[in-house]
């Protein structure tokens, strides 16, 4: 029967499509589309860098048992193959080649009989193949994180295999019983030892049932653990909501700008799901390039820049934005004066370098990361006024803000209040960003909560201008609230002589909430924050130290 072309095994082998050839496969945002040698065989789609590597092992594989094959809506030569969260983006050289691949993949899915519950399909493919294929698909989908649903699926599959094995054991029992009877009839003189096959079969059935009972118990334990985590998450959510209510007006200033929802469909790339590691690699490369550009520019600059000619001054207190400026500045300074423990729950220390400590609290709004940040630092040799002066003044921004591509003073409201329009460099693959915000510098009065003779602050906060509407051009609008609070500490010389820079230090508190505007993976943004914020604070303070080391000490303007 094995050589009979009409046998079931032979027909199945004929119907299982096998195909190989070169297709373009999307790799990442750095390298884009690359030619790869793709092989479809035995229900598995695998790829190699080229045909010569076939004998050295594949670079990746997908089981087609639960795969979804989807031709692209616009690109006639492209099709996608996905198994749970794993997606391959493939492109053929022509429409005909693409169609042949799609037909072969669909043909296998039809012939596989997977998931039909049919006993014949299980017999036709064999229990070993079915188990391998299911195990591979489960691994691809990261089933551990969806344990409850997938464990029950596995229980159902094991139940099916148990029924098959039990029927096979019953058949073998009948066969061996018949053999024993014939042997006894042929040799009545000498009794031969009789094996209790029936007892062995009963033992095997009992063991199988015990395995299933144990797995079912595991599923119940997983469900109980998930329920406990769900209750814990609810309690944590309630605590965070209570903390947010303490600074409700603070977050309303950020959330009011979230008018246009952004998603991955508006970003570059051939698909809408961005892999975090690819996105972060591209962002990291862009930031490194900007750092190199800043160093080169710093070497070429002679330290002199002509500030832009400001428009006519107007008293800040009579400006239309003054009520908002007054309110936001008061809120931000009060928040900056509070310790991390007083600002609400959820703050995490994510960076520490000597005197510098940086905390963040994970927050998302409409799917966007808007993590509040709070940093404290102590720098010797500079005053609070000097630090705020260089942070506020537009003529110095190009020196220390490495992501800045273009800065425009939209309006000089007064000497201490300016409206800015800033365009930041495009960090590929993210879209270019811009920001419209007012910046206000103020000397704060001494009170019981502060020490030392001097306390200065600079607050930047996003605003809306009809002349510069958000998200209408190539740039995505960033919304931000930033507070730099600087307190000068003086240690009087013991000999009663004049105060030098060795006798002064500045306690810095930096708070920010930034809404990136467009979509980006949360893990990528948080990884960038962890890397860039400490570098920014150290770079900026080092810049101010370098600018003031040979200048007279300035406690005020």
Image (spheres, grey):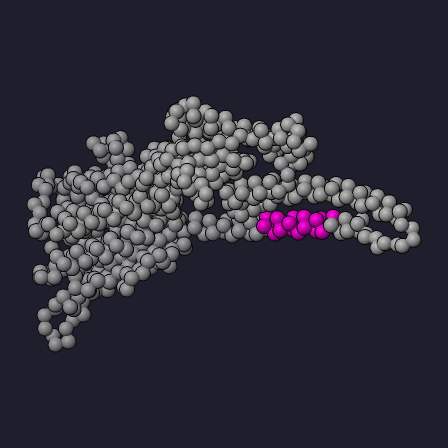
Q: Quadrant of the N terminus?
A: top right
Image quarter of residue 52: top left
Instruction: Tell me where the magenta segment starts and ends, as one range.
Output: 205-223
**Image x and y of residue 322, in percent:** 21, 42
Image quarter of residue 339: bottom left
Q: Quadrant of the C terminus?
A: bottom left
**Image x and y of residue 64, in percent:** 53, 35
Q: Is residue 367 visible?
A: no
Q: Is residue 170 left or right of residue 513?
A: right
Q: On screen, 307 above or below 342?
A: above
Q: Is residue 214 magenta?
A: yes
Q: Residue at x 32, y 39 (%)?
A: 31
Q: Residue furthest right?
A: 189
Q: Residue at x 36, y 40 (%)?
A: 28
Q: Is residue 56 left or right of residue 189?
A: left
Q: Is residue 411 magenta?
A: no
Q: Is residue 171 left or right of residue 540?
A: right
**Image x and y of residue 113, in percent:** 61, 32
Compare residues 250 and 52 and report the one nearer the observer: 52
Q: Residue at x 40, y 28 (%)?
A: 92
Q: Residue at x 47, y 25 (%)?
A: 100
Q: Is residue 201 left or right of residue 462?
A: right
- Image mark count: 0
Main SS class of the magenta portion in the image? helix
Q: Residue furthest bottom?
A: 495
Q: Is residue 137 visible?
A: yes
**Image x and y of residue 271, in percent:** 39, 34
């Amino acid at each position: 029967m094995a050589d009979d072309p009409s046998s079931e095994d032979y027909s199945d082998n004929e119907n299982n499509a096998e195909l190989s050839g070169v297709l373009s496969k999307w790799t990442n945002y750095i390298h884009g589309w690359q030619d790869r040698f793709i092989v479809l065989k035995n229900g598995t789609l695998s790829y190699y860098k080229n045909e010569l590597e076939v004998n050295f092992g594949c670079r990746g594989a997908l089981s087609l048992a639960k795969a979804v094959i989807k031709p692209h809506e616009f690109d006639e030569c492209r099709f996608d193959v996905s198994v749970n969260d794993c997606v391959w983006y493939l492109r053929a050289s022509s429409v005909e080649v693409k169609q042949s691949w799609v037909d072969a993949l669909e043909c296998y899915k039809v012939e596989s009989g997977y998931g039909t519950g049919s006993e014949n399909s299980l017999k036709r493919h064999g229990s070993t193949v079915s188990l391998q294929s299911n195990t591979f698909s489960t691994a691809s989908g990261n089933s551990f994180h969806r344990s409850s649903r997938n464990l029950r699926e596995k229980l159902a599959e094991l139940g099916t295999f148990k029924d098959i094995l039990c029927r096979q054991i019953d058949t073998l029992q009948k066969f061996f019983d018949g053999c024993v009877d014939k042997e006894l009839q042929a040799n009545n003189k000498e009794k031969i030892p009789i094996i209790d096959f029936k007892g062995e079969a009963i033992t095997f059935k009992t063991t199988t049932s015990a395995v299933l009972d144990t797995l079912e118990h595991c599923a119940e334990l997983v469900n109980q653990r998930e329920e406990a985590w769900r209750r814990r998450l609810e309690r944590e959510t309630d605590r965070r909501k209570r903390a947010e209510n303490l600074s409700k007006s603070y977050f309303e200033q950020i959330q009011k700008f979230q008018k246009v929802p952004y998603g991955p469909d508006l970003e570059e790339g051939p698909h809408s799901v961005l892999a975090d590691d690819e996105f972060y690699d591209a962002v990291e490369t862009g930031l490194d390039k900007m750092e190199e550009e800043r160093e080169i520019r710093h070497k070429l600059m002679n330290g002199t820049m002509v500030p832009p000619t400001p428009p006519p001054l107007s008293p800040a207190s009579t400006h239309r934005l003054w009520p908002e400026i007054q309110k936001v500045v008061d809120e931000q300074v009060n928040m900056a004066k509070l310790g991390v423990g007083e600002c609400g729950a959820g703050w995490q220390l994510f960076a520490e370098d000597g005197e510098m400590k940086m905390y963040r609290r994970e927050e998302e709004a409409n799917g966007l990361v808007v993590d509040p940040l709070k940093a404290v630092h102590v720098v010797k040799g500079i005053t609070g006024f000097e630090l705020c002066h260089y942070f506020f003044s537009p003529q110095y921004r190009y020196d220390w803000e490495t992501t800045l591509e273009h800065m425009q003073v939209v309006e000089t409201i007064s000497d201490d209040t300016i409206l800015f329009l800033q365009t930041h460099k495009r960090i590929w693959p993210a879209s270019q960003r811009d920001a419209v915000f007012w910046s206000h510098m103020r000397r704060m009065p001494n009170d019981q909560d502060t020490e030392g003779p001097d306390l200065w602050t600079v607050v930047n906060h996003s605003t809306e201008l009809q002349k510069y509407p958000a998200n209408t051009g190539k740039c995505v609008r960033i919304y931000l609230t930033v507070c730099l609070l600087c307190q000068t500490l003086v240690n009087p010389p013991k000999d009663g002589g004049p105060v030098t820079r060795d006798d002064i230090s500045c306690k810095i508190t930096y708070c920010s909430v930034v809404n990136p505007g467009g979509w980006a993976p949360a893990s990528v943004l948080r990884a960038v924050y962890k890397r860039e914020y400490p570098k920014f604070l150290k770079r900026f303070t080092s810049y101010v130290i370098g600018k003031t080391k040979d200048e007279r000490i300035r406690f005020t303007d």
